[in-house]
Image (spheres, grey):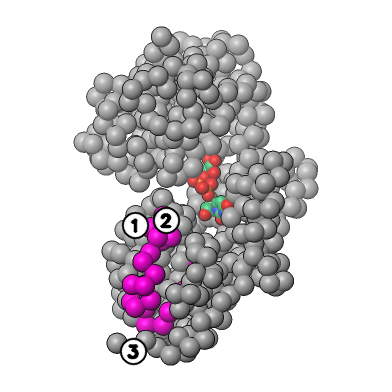
Amino acid sequence: MSERISIAVVGSGYVGLVATACFAEIGHRVICVDNDEAKLRTLESGGVPIHEDYLPELLNRHRGHSVEFTSDLGAATREAQAVFIAVGTPQSRTGSADLSYVDAVASEIARSIDEYKVIVEKSTVPVYTNEWIRRVVERNGVSRELFDVASNPEFLREGTAVVDFLHADRIVVGADTDRASDLMKSIYAPLTSGEYYRSSNAVPGPRGEGNAPPLLQTSTKAAEIIKHASNAFLATKISFINVVANICEAAGADVEEVARGMGMDSRIGPKFLKAGVGYGGSCFPKDVAAFRHVAEQLGVDFGLLKEVEKINDEQRRRFFQKVRSALWTFRGKRIGVLGLAFKGGTDDIRESPALDVVRQMLHEGSIVTAYDPAASDRAKELIPPGPQMRYVNDAYAAAQDADALVILNEWQEFAELDLKRLHYTLRYPIIIDGRNLYEPMKMLEHGFTYLSVGRPGLTHTRDAVTPRVR
Ligand code: UDX
């Protein structure tokens, strides 16, 4: 049996809340700390403020026994053997990560240290942050023997965060002392030993008893860099395939075939080669900028990342032009929109390419009717409903009498639409798909004019110019 460890998690955002639920799920006692009293009340009464598979079930399973919520960081620190910092590290005006929350939390933790603790960076932070945390804690009068700082980056994706945590590709632990690394190894032992997967109500996923996730131990600095470098690399892969898509478009080839051919090379791999409207979300844009800033600070020229960002911005603009090429003008046009979140499977709209495209369409005078299975409420806060902007509750309502339908993220239900019904519902059967969810030939056979990314656009000539007559 693995040891039950007392853990404090500071921050109840995506990372903190998922870590809280998952640490409890693998047998530890977790106190989740936040200074937002309203959020704490929601969490205590069974509410879950984010859309994440398995999260409500796990919090229900462990709330009150293994999971507690509090605003008292001092008390939580005193009870914990390890304190995970999972607060936000937003982008500052210069592009660097704003570490003021981490700094404030480190000082507060320091004031409550009375016996040995490991302070763990879980937020994505630039290299050297562990040293700053160490200095801050020492400045607050805590002696070196009473604490260590470790780095344990997470690689979870929104929407699949719980499975990503419990069935990780790898667990990275950056620790510079044996004492710290031993505690970290004990925390993850239920996963690395395979023990967790034997439990009958374990969350299912790719890992199992004989296929447990490896734990990679590194220096704290290496762990910090692994996180930034991984996200920057994945963003680079996406920008790369988006440029290849643009080449395909110009040459008359299909980027899906090209990506398949590239991905079959095991050195390249098939993942993150999906061309589209560009990446968004709370991580990639911020982390690419922060890593570029880290490089600059260290005197290293990482111009490649500037290019990755430029391509990503350009991809949204290109897509908007594609919509224009199908509609000619925007003023007064009714456009159905599927997808508002930065990707499918989440309610997160941070840095969403979809919202950018919608804003541009509104700016040019279109009337937009939008549907997203989870993100509409959040989108309404940024783009309030009004005469030009309507939110509806299903895909066909978005398409109803529209001059064109624009697909902006990849919820599974957007890829499974009844094409006959869709054709009948639209005023003009024109679809501009920013996520390549359909086969172009199939769409043509169903009478659609179908434009996608990095594939030849197919125009169904008769229907494209003649509105459907009811
Ligand atoms: C990402 C990382 O994957 C995760 O490891 C890290 O911890 C946080 O950042 P997330 O932001 O949840 O996770 O989303 P992800 O699924 O990685 O997608 C990021 C963006 O890239 C989305 O906008 C998505 O639509 C886009 N994307 C992804 C593509 O355009 N093409 C792809 O092939 C993959």
Would you say 170 lies left or right of 359 here? right
Nearer to me, 143 or 199: 199
What amino acid is at disc 3?
Val
What amino acid is at disc 2?
Trp
Report which residue position mark 1 lands on.
373
Q: Which image quarter: residue 279? A: bottom right
**Secondary structure of residue under mark 1:** loop
Across and down, in percent, residue 431 comes to 47, 74
Across and down, in percent, residue 418 comes to 36, 66
Q: Find out whether residue 244 is within the magenta segment.
A: no
Q: Find out whether residue 420 is within the magenta segment.
A: yes
Q: Do the residues labelled 1 and 2 touch (CB within 8 Å)?
A: yes
Report which residue position mark 2 lands on.
411
Nearer to me, 102 or 349: 349
User: Magenta stretch?
Assistant: 411-433
**Secondary structure of residue under mark 3:** loop
**Secondary structure of residue under mark 2:** loop
Report which residue position mark 3 lands on.
469
Q: Work out how far the residue at label 1 is from the one at label 2, CA to CA, in angstroms.
A: 8 Å
**Residue drawn 33% across and 77% down?**
425
User: Mark 1 or 2 closer to N-term?
Assistant: 1
